Image (cartoon, rainbow, N blue to C red):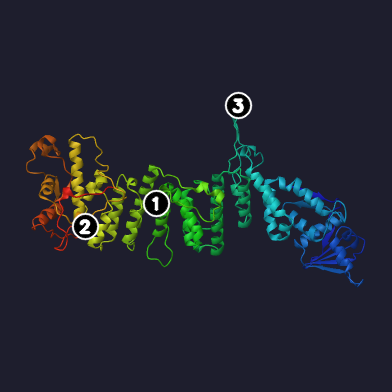
């Protein structure tokens, strides 16, 4: 703490305990100055020799017998006036970071300029500020905090701007040049704690982190903090990542409940909303300057606090540019009160759409962004790994929101269809989400089941997913048939020693999902299909059996050999195969009943069956 001592006489001000202050001297006082509720019994000569305002007030008093002056609005109140009065008497005055602003404003009010007397109080305070206070990191922050209660005087005297420039300049210097005890909120350096810094006779080089100033500035109110961040940005020497870290630390410190989803119930909502919108406005434009997780927390808070649409749109654009970094819990943004669904799926749809727009070159910037910054926000080609990461993220998100019984099927389908074909080389995640939606929404109609299962490409399911799917009674019967068919093709290719990637695409499509027509779903298995299915291993009632022409050796070993003319099949419940066989035995019409609302049933108005092997399937 820096301080300055003015005057050489001891403090002779005394009080009688009734808001009366006087100077202990043999000379009788000849003026009473009322400052607020405190009366100062003083002498005219020392006061008038240094204060032009007091000279005018005394001269304006017509009645010579009236020796009282009232000053009601002196900045800093009685304490600041007492500092000025002591200086006039030549008494000892201690100035420090806590009282220097009040003394400076009071001296300005009393007009204690050089024109009245050389070496007056204003001059001495200015020297103290320039040579001591503004050279100290900690004192500059303390002084800036004290200026708030002395507005607009401190603003008019440029004390606020000088403090901000001093702090911004110190924060912007190279961290390797920081030699002082750089913070009073972080843990001290080992050397400052008295720890041994010697190792094998070599002194360790202590490094100051680039964000050493971040936590100290969290003590400031939003208005000062905003101006400081803008000043640091204007210096142009601070990276976007460090500024982003500063904004993150400030947000967690100043918005109660941030990140827990409960901030709307804590503190002043209007104040939190204003602070949040300012943080969004201050975010650096560089991609990656703040984490995607933090951006999504900001968006969640903006939704809970009902912030302005401009701020939400800005966050959505930023999140879309780095969506591959997000996690599923980050995307679970609660819906606003009054909405039926648990989570705000519209917000996530907008985010994914922004991500997709990057690849199409259609991304655009916020109208608030200046033309100078347009280049930093121009769209870039999205890498294949980013697309795959986002697809996995979306599938995981779909699996979570599928638990909501009030989630409309259209929202589920719209989000699943948002991504391009090359985003999902494997459809296991999508299958898991579809299965969960079917489980939580048992009342889906036949057409709705067709629609949601049409999102899935059976050729892109792993062996484990196929094993699960063929025993999944929630799936439409036709979906099970497709899974069985393509798994059998994969098994045949493996047995034949083919090197092609059977789990990959069997075709191409511009759509991110498989589009199955009504004929695809309602078509019945052909005789060839049934022969193929009969050759598969059947599971039912806790036992298994193989096709009648399998030799005994392969039966005992539990696997098929290519030389026997058969191909190893996957496990399939007898119940499902029974439905297939019974449907074929009804003169070409599928009359079997599916407890899960399977679209395998058909009526006379529906199209005729399409041979399974001749059906075209689009591949995502």
Q: Is residue 99 visible in this depiction of the protein?
A: no
Q: Is residue 33 visible in this depiction of the protein?
A: yes
Work out how far the residue at label 1 is from the one at label 3, CA to CA, in angstroms.
50 Å
Residue 198, image x, y percentages: 60, 30
Residue 284, image x, y percentages: 54, 49
Which of the two labelled residues, at mark 2 and mark 3, occupies the earlier sequence position?
3
Who is closer to the viewer here, 499 or 579? 499
Left of 606 or right of it: where is 230? right
Which residue is label 2 attached to?
518
Left of 377 or right of it: where is 61? right
Work out how far the residue at label 2 is from the one at label 3, CA to CA, in angstroms.
81 Å
Eyeballing the image, is 252 above or below 242? below
Q: In the drawing, what numbered circle is on residue 328?
A: 1
The label nearer to you, 2 versus 3, is: 2
Determine which quarter of the picture holds residue 505: top left
Q: Determine the residue positioned at 48% across, 58% down.
A: 312
């Amino acid at each position: 703490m820096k301080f300055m001592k003015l005057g050489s006489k001891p403090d002779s001000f005394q009080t009688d305990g009734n808001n009366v202050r006087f100077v202990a001297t043999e000379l009788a006082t000849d003026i009473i100055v009322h400052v607020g509720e405190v009366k100062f019994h003083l002498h005219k000569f020392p006061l008038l020799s240094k204060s032009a305002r007091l000279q005018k007030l005394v001269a304006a008093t017509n009645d010579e017998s009236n020796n009282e002056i009232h000053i009601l609005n002196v900045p800093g109140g009685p304490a600041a006036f007492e500092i000025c009065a002591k200086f006039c008497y030549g008494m000892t005055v201690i100035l420090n970071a806590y009282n220097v602003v009040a003394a400076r404003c009071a001296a300005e009010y009393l007009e204690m300029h050089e024109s009245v007397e050389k070496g007056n109080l204003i001059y001495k305070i200015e020297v103290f500020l320039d040579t001591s206070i503004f050279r100290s990191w900690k004192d500059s922050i303390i002084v800036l905090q004290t200026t708030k209660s002395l507005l607009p005087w401190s603003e008019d005297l440029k004390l606020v701007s000088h403090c901000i420039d001093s702090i911004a300049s110190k924060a912007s210097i190279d961290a390797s040049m920081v030699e002082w005890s750089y913070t009073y909120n972080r843990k001290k350096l080992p050397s400052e704690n008295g720890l041994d810094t010697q190792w094998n006779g070599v002194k360790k080089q202590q490094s100051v982190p680039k964000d050493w100033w971040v936590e100290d500035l969290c003590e400031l109110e939003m208005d000062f903090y905003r101006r400081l961040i803008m000043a640091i940005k204007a210096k142009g020497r601070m990276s976007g990542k460090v500024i982003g870290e500063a904004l993150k630390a400030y947000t967690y410190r100043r918005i109660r409940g941030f990140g827990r989803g409960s901030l709307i119930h804590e503190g002043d909502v209007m104040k939190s909303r204003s602070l949040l919108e300012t943080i969004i406005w201050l975010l650096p434009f560089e991609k990656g300057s703040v984490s995607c997780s933090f951006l999504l927390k900001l968006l969640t808070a903006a939704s809970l606090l009902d912030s302005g649409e401009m701020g939400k749109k800005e966050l959505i654009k930023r999140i879309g540019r780095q969506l591959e970094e997000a996690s599923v819990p980050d995307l679970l943004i609660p819906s606003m009160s009054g909405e039926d669904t648990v989570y705000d799926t519209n917000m996530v749809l907008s985010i994914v759409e922004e991500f997709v727009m990057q690849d199409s070159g259609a991304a655009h910037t916020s109208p608030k962004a200046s033309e100078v910054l347009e280049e930093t926000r121009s769209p870039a080609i999205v890498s294949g790994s980013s697309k795959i990461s986002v697809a996995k993220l979306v599938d995981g998100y779909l699996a979570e929101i599928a638990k909501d019984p009030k989630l409309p099927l259209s929202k589920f389908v719209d989000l699943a269809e948002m991504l391009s074909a090359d985003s999902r080389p494997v459809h296991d995640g999508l299958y898991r989400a579809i299965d969960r939606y079917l489980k939580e929404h048992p009342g889906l109609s036949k057409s709705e089941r067709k629609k949601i299962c049409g999102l899935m490409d059976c050729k892109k399911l792993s062996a484990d997913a196929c094993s699960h799917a063929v025993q999944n009674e929630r799936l439409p019967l036709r979906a099970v048939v497709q899974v069985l068919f393509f798994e059998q093709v994969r098994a045949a290719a493996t047995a034949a020693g083919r090197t092609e990637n059977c789990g990959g695409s069997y075709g191409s499509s511009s759509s991110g999902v498989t589009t199955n027509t009504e004929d695809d779903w309602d078509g019945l298995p052909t005789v060839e299909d049934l022969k193929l299915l009969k050759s598969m291993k059947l599971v039912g009632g806790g036992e298994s059996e193989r096709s009648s022409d399998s030799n005994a050796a392969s039966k005992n070993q539990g696997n098929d050999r290519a030389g026997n003319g058969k191909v190893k099949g996957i496990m399939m419940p007898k119940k499902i195969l029974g439905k297939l066989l019974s449907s074929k035995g009804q003169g070409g019409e599928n009359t079997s009943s599916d407890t899960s609302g399977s679209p395998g049933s058909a009526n006379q108005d529906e199209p005729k069956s399409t041979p399974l092997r001749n059906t075209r399937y689009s591949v995502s």
